[in-house]
Image (tube, rainbow, N blue to C red):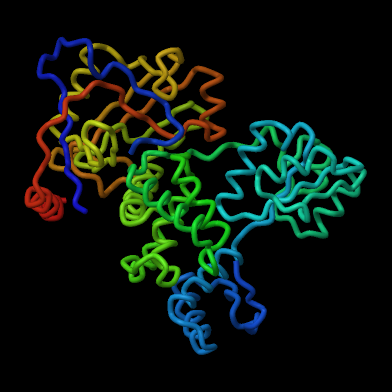
Amino acid sequence: MKLPVYELKISEKMNDDSEVSFIALVDEPAIQKDFLAFRDEFIQPSKGEHETEFMPRCIKYVMDEGKEQEQAIAICSSIWSEHFAGNISFDYDDTLSTERGKQLAADYIANGDNVYIISARHDKEGMLGVAESLGIPASRVFAVGSNSAKIEKIKELQISKHIDNNADVVKALGEVGQKFSEVKFEETYNDYPKAASENAKIALRWAEENGWGECGTPVGKIRANQLSKGEPISRDTIARMSAFERHRQNSQKELGDGCGRLMWLAWGGDEGIEWAKRKLEQIDKMRKQAFSITNEEQRIVSGPLMIADELIYRNNDKFGEHYVKFSGDTIKAIAIKFSKRKYQSNVNLMHDPNQQVEGVTMFESWIVDKERGIKPMMGYEDVTDGSWFGSFYVENEEVWSKIKKGEFRGFSVEGLFDYDQPLSYEEQMLQKIKNLLFS
């Protein structure tokens, strides 16, 4: 599906105060089956083996064991997911007993991790209800009686990460331990198309009437429930959706004819998978556009403010799924207007007008123009002319501390912009050719 591209414009009235008045510091720049029948030493992924290497090897082996190709793909996908699933454990009191803790556990489970509850309590009373609500089996709930026994149980179960509010337990576990209050929530997204939610609902209705049978893994069923409810999903979940593209050859079968169609719909169907591929590219591209601390002693952060002709994915009620972009000329007009209005100290946090901050000032601003000898920052050599970069001096102690911790990773120019007519597919191709010829 080719999405329309809208160019965003600002008013030509340079004295208009309603647009382009702030730069925000932001955290993300805009820019089940029993396998014991198989030889474990062969069927398990080897150390350092990539998924693209493991899957063909596994599928061939499983088919040689007498399975159909569709079954082999489902089995091997499940093996790969299980192999890389982490064993995550939570303390209960003041950790998993909190709403924040439950949400964090739900995120891990949705991403395919095996979640345990390991508490210093003497009995499981109260914990089993929470475990059931999260879908954690009772066999993964432990009340061990003391913190020392908790540490031993964590080691015995080969837990890869344990989240606890007890600083002594966290310290004793070394790299495995993580203080609950210091856990950061990963950025989540719920702007996937409504059609993806509808596809997941179709899968759930069919499974409710006919059963899942041998189709899918617990992760796939969780995914269907998330999408059907419009719940936010993480970057890792989006990556898994995008990777589901490998099952497209089975997507057009009828429901009931094997597992292909059912699981394709459970993961969002055509619309969901295509959205995930675009969204993953956008997220990773924007993460690369984060600013860097160019001089810690002098408290300077530098980075891209706007990238010319960069396609930015959007999805709203008025325009549906689409891309927006800023031309070099528009970015230049924005930069001029910003400077003319003396907005160099107009900075807020996360586009929140109630979080305007003092002591953060833009003292350098430049538009890339290779012909004039004005180059981009190191690491951004491939950006097109017209891209806007800036450097900020940070006197504000609280903001500087959060930048160093990674809570703010980039800039986002704030403004009100008009949608121009979308570029046709042919115009998009010409634009790409132009960029290749003159970059």
The foreground one among 213 and 235 is 213
Tell me which residue sits at (11%, 14%) in the image: 13
Q: Residue at x 34, y 69 (%)?
A: 253
Q: Is residue 52 shown above or below 343? A: below
Q: Position of 84 compared to 435: left or right? A: right
Q: Quadrant of residue 41?
A: bottom right
Q: Quadrant of the N terminus?
A: bottom left
Q: Is residue 59 left or right of residue 438?
A: right
Q: Quadrant of residue 39?
A: bottom right
Residue 136's spot in the image, x, y percent?
69, 50
Seen in the image, is 30 located left or right of residue 427? right
> Relative to residue 289, is residue 113 drawn left or right?
right
Q: How many marks?
A: 0
Q: Nearer the viewer, residue 147 or 320?
A: 320
- How far across and how far down the image is residue 146, in percent? 92, 43
What residue lies at 48% left-to-right and 80% top-to-bottom?
59
Look at the image and tell me whether residue 416 can be seen: yes
The reply to whether residue 175 is visible in this rendering is no
- Where is residue 77? Give x, y as percent: 51, 69
From the top left corner, tell me how far across and down residue 134 is, in percent.
Answer: 65, 44
Q: Nearer the viewer, residue 310 or 280?
A: 280
Q: Residue at 85% of width from left, 49% of height from top? A: 151
